[in-house]
Image: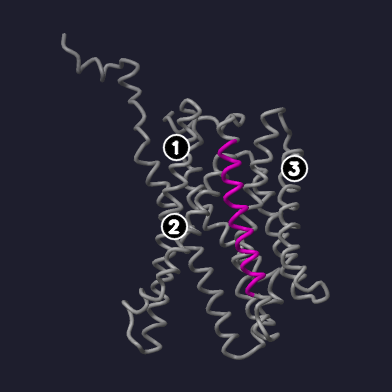
């Protein structure tokens, strides 16, 4: 048995609880910023058509932030409760799901209160609440270290996207000409590059978070396949967010597509680009984390050498 093949993580310590609170705080700020930015953008439009398209553009980011925040807040609540008493599986899932639901309802109010009489914002608010609730339920699984690693990896993916978007204009100018097709091709390759860098960051961050938790628990580690799951987790959450966008939020996207033929094409392109990027983050993150942990796993000792078999004795001097 290698040093990776050990029991799951023990009950959360004070240090783990503190780390979970910090992560929950970071993701809450992220979610609040996304929702208030969406609200400001939507309410700042002067006509109905622009209001609809702005809502469709803001929906995926709000869903992703809500999904991740629901999981991290639920994990922090479970960590604080676990320091006081042991919780069963049913109680754990109830608390996790309830925590995510509370965060989702609070986030939904930010959007629903834009216009309480229209169905458009009710759909967006309901989708945000559903995303946070699903995220909370995911935190109910007894792999808190992995959920924490996925949370930090998701924050890293967001930061990579934020930085690259700030330099998107200069990068497009550098890798394309003034022709529309050239800029479209460059934009696609930049999207692939962003997905790759995001997946690389997600895998490395997930690995370092799990190794840090291992050092804090006197060498007790999660099984090595969970490193791959943690690395893939940020991409997996992006895939779930895209599924929610296309299902629960489909009426918003359909309405935006009816504004014009151009808007319909843009929505289809953005939807495909988001899914492709999420899959790239998923696979690159999983491979990166697996390779990183694989380099630390020592080979199992030779049984023949341990037991002193004739094969081992023959190598000894008489």
Q: How many marks?
A: 3
Real-space CA distance between mark 3 and mark 1, rounded to the nearest whole angstrom = 27 Å
Q: Are marks 2 and 1 in contact (CB under 8 Å)?
A: no
Task: Locate the N terminus and report the quarter of the image it occupies.
Answer: top left
Which residue in the structure is indicated by mark 1? 211
Q: Secondary structure at mark 3?
A: helix
Which residue in the structure is indicated by mark 2? 199
Which residue in the structure is indicated by mark 3? 95
Left or right, 276 with respect to 106, comes to left
Q: Going 76% across and 68% down the picture, which residue do you hit?
A: 112
Toward which corner of the image does residue 113 lie, by quadrant? bottom right
Left or right, 51 with respect to 152, comes to right
Percent position of residue 125, x then y = 74, 66
Q: Going 46% across and 57% down the picture, which residue do you hit?
A: 283
Real-space CA distance between mark 2 and mark 1, rounded to the nearest whole angstrom = 18 Å
Magenta part of the chain: 18-41
Q: Nearer the viewer, residue 20 or 247?
A: 20
Residue sitting farthest toward the top:
318
Q: Going 47% across and 64% down the picture, which residue do you hit?
A: 162
Which of the two labelled residues, at mark 2 and mark 1, occupies the earlier sequence position?
2
């Amino acid at each position: 048995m290698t040093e990776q093949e050990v029991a799951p993580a023990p009950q959360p310590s004070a240090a783990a609880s503190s780390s979970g609170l910090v992560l929950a705080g970071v993701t809450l700020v992220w979610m609040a910023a996304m929702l208030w930015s969406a609200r400001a953008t939507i309410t700042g439009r002067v006509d109905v058509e622009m209001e609809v398209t702005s809502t469709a553009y803001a929906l995926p980011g709000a869903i992703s932030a809500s999904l991740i925040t629901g999981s991290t807040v639920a994990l922090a609540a479970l960590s604080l409760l676990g320091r006081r008493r042991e919780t069963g599986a049913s109680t754990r899932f109830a608390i996790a799901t309830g925590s995510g639901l509370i965060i989702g309802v609070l986030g939904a109010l930010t959007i629903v209160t834009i216009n309480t009489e229209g169905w458009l914002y009710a759909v967006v608010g309901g989708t945000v609440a559903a995303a946070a609730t699903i995220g909370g339920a995911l935190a109910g699984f007894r792999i808190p270290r992995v959920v924490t690693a996925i949370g930090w990896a998701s924050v890293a993916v967001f930061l990579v996207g934020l930085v690259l978007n700030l330099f998107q204009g200069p990068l497009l100018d550098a890798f394309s000409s003034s022709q529309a097709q050239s800029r479209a091709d460059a934009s696609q390759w930049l999207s692939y590059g962003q997905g790759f860098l995001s997946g690389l960051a997600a895998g490395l961050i997930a690995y370092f978070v799990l190794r840090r938790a291992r050092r804090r628990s006197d060498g007790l580690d999660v099984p090595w396949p969970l490193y791959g799951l943690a690395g893939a987790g940020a991409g997996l959450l992006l895939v779930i967010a895209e599924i929610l966008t296309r299902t629960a939020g489909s009426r918003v996207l359909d309405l935006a597509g009816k504004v014009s033929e151009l808007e319909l094409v843009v929505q289809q392109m953005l939807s495909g680009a988001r899914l492709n990027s999420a899959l790239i983050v998923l696979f690159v993150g999983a491979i990166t984390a697996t390779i990183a942990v694989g380099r630390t796993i020592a080979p199992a000792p030779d049984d023949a050498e341990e037991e002193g078999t004739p094969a081992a004795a023959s190598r000894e001097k008489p």
